[in-house]
Image (cartoon, rainbow, N blue to C red):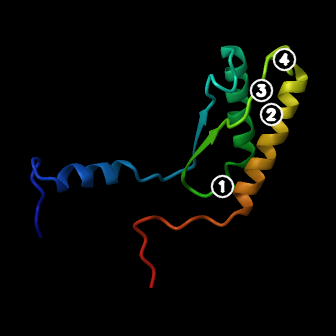
Amino acid sequence: MAIAKQNSPEAPRESLRARCIVHEVWIGAMVPKRWAKRAVTRNAIKRQIYSVSTDFESALPVAAHVVRLRAGFGHQQFISATSDMLKATVRQELQQLFADAVARPAAPLANDVSS
């Protein structure tokens, strides 16, 4: 059994791999300024992401999941970040997204070798 020295190239890779193992469901939210200009809107969308994710957390596979906003929620369409219309629209899209994620079979791990 070889032990990797701190200076060897194997040492950082092994420690990084050990740090990347996820033992529970993690949810991350990315809401870029490009799609939601106002901070209050971005924060409201993030709160909705975390709120809806708790409803589906037990059914999601153990992994780190990231929800990223890919289209705009403009100030012209949704006048107020606290409007019921914005909340309902975001919640409906998130529920569909998480339902699709739960229905999709879990992808195998990159280093998982099955024969």
Report how far apart the C-alphas of labels 4 and 2 lie in the structure.
16 Å
Q: Position of residue 8 (x, y in %)?
A: 11, 52
Q: Position of residue 80 (x, y in %)?
A: 83, 14
Quadrant in which the N terminus is drawn = bottom left
Q: Position of residue 79 (x, y in %)?
A: 85, 14
Q: Amino acid at mark 4?
A: Gln
Relative to 93, residue 3 above or below:
below
Relative to 3, residue 57 above or below:
above
Q: In the rendered image, which residue does mark 2 sit on?
A: 90
Report how far apart the C-alphas of labels 4 and 3 lie in the structure.
9 Å
Image depth: mark 4 or mark 1 in front: 4
Element type where label 1 sits in the image: loop
- On the picture, is 3 further left or further right than 64? left
Neighbours of disc 2 within 10 Å: few (<14), some (14-19), many (20+):
some
Report how far apart the C-alphas of labels 1 and 2 lie in the structure.
20 Å
Q: Amino acid at mark 1?
A: Leu
- The reply to whether discs 3 and 2 touch (Cβ–Cβ < 8 Å) is yes
Residue beneath the point at 67% across and 48% down: 57
Q: In the rendered image, which residue does mark 3 sit on?
A: 73
Element type where label 2 sits in the image: helix
Q: Which disc number belongs to residue 76?
A: 4
Report how far apart the C-alphas of labels 3 and 2 lie in the structure.
9 Å
Neighbours of disc 3 within 10 Å: few (<14), some (14-19), many (20+):
many
Q: Position of residue 21 (x, y in %)?
A: 41, 53
Report how far apart the C-alphas of labels 4 and 1 lie in the structure.
35 Å
- Give the image quarter of residue 85: top right
Residue beneath the point at 46% across and 52% down: 22
Image depth: mark 3 or mark 2 in front: 3
Q: Amino acid at mark 3?
A: Phe
The residue sitting at the bottom extreme is: 115
